[in-house]
Amino acid sequence: MEEKKRGSFRGSIGFVLAAAGSAVGLGNIWRFPALAAKDGGGLFLMIYLIMAVTFGFTLLLTEVAIGRKTRQSPLTAYGKLHKKSGWIGGLACAVPFIIMPYYCVIGGWVLKYLTVYLTGNGEDATDSGFFSGFITAQYEPIIFTLIFLAMCAVIIFFGVGKGIERISRILMPILLILVIGISVYSLTLEHTDEVTGATTTGLQGLRVYVIPNFDGITFDKVVNVTVDALGQLFFSISVAMGIMVAYGSYVSDDTNMVKSVNQIEIFDTVVAFLAGVMIIPAVYVFQGVEGMNGGPSLMFVALPNVFKAMGPVGHFIRAAFFMMVLFAAVTSAMSIMEAVVSSLMDRFKWTRSKATIAEGTAALVLAVVVCLGYNKFYFEATLPNTPEGGSAQILDIMDYISNNVLMPVVAIATCIMIGWVLKPSTVIDEVTKNGERLGRKNLFIVMVKFIAPVLLFTLLLVSFGLL
């Protein structure tokens, strides 16, 4: 009765698509390609893949297992598993609570650009001051943020099966088709420089992306690339933010969790790779490697100019691209919201509608503050991860606290709890209770007890600017 009341996924495919939808978000689209371009292309891809099948697999499997074993959301799951570890759940719930407001703001930016392109005003987006003019406006960003948040809230209001799973089954296949289509087109691009007469092609950009560049390679360089790959993977697979614990609590006991986690990893990695194929060749053709800067500037400044340079077909490509980005943003944002809503339901025994309204209201208030951080509340701050010559605003501070501080702490604490307090058998027994085989059992034990905590602690030191 408890499982029916909380809701559940109707099948393993629904769970995989929902979890993959959470993993495939804005970070994959604007951060992954930029890091790959910065870190030697294929070298970054190679290290990222190694991290995915070891570190990523360990954390993903652990959190899904915690959710299914306890049948609880992140706020209450850790305490149910181990009474003295309830504080981990508190931090795990705080992460999506902090992320949701500013993620909706960025989702509003995506919605604005899609609207501009669908209404035939795409040329406006290529103006040098368009993006900064929009985000510094007082009311328009708030309106688009509200629309985006409302879209997510409606999905969560309908619950797990009729909301999250149904939307994931619709949006994820469409998203994948759009990603593949734009990727293929990106490889066919070519551009001839009017001054030098040199022709640059998308296939040349692909080679920059996938072929490892070992020029000037040093041990420090490998360490830096590893830290970048670890940080990207950490956010990409949606661990340490309560999402996979919440989703795991909706997974039926007869689901093959090892198989499902492998499928989620594959889906996320493939889309992350294809995001690079979409963006790097296109930007390389028209702007060179210099155009590959991460963050909002890549998606909202560099790419609109790339689409403009494509000519008439660019009108269709840019609309398709931002439609794809919107789908990715929605599937991620709804999972972030669900982590908080499910926590309120389990902790306070609220109905889904009450919890959704409460979290939606809180997210809206904080999102308005984030929007005003670019005008009324504007100030300049410096964080350990602030680029040289740059400054941080409210959005950047919230992102830093959630992603660079709280998430590593939650993950380290989770590894210690499972690896040393409760022992790895807690997860192993849960994922193999139907006779499934855990092929990476020994790897899991070594990772959760030793390697993952060390890697996470290193990432935390980097976040604090101590390495």
Image: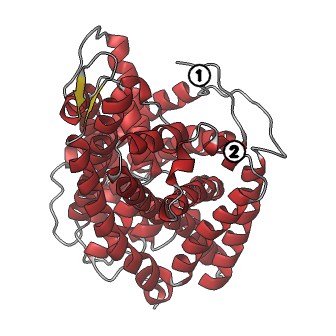
Position of 426 relative to 397 (above/below) = below
In this rendering, would 464 be left or right of 440?
A: right
- Depth order, front residue of 245/47: 47
Mark 1 residue element: loop
Residue at x 41%, y 28% (from the top left corner):
227
Q: Amino acid at mark 1?
A: Gly
Position of 150 relative to 423 (above/below) = below
Count of marks, rendered view = 2
Q: Nearer the viewer, mark 2 or mark 1?
A: 2
In this rendering, would 358 be left or right of 226?
A: right
Q: Position of residue 257 (x, y in %)?
A: 26, 65
**Which residue carries the number 2 mark?**
133
Q: Which mark is residue 465?
A: 1
In this rendering, would 269 be left or right of 394?
A: left
Q: Which mark is residue 438?
A: none
Residue at x 55%, y 71% (from the top left corner):
152
- Depth order, front residue of 48/206: 206
Q: Position of residue 141 (x, y in %)?
A: 69, 57
Mark 2 residue element: helix
Q: Amino acid at mark 2?
A: Gly
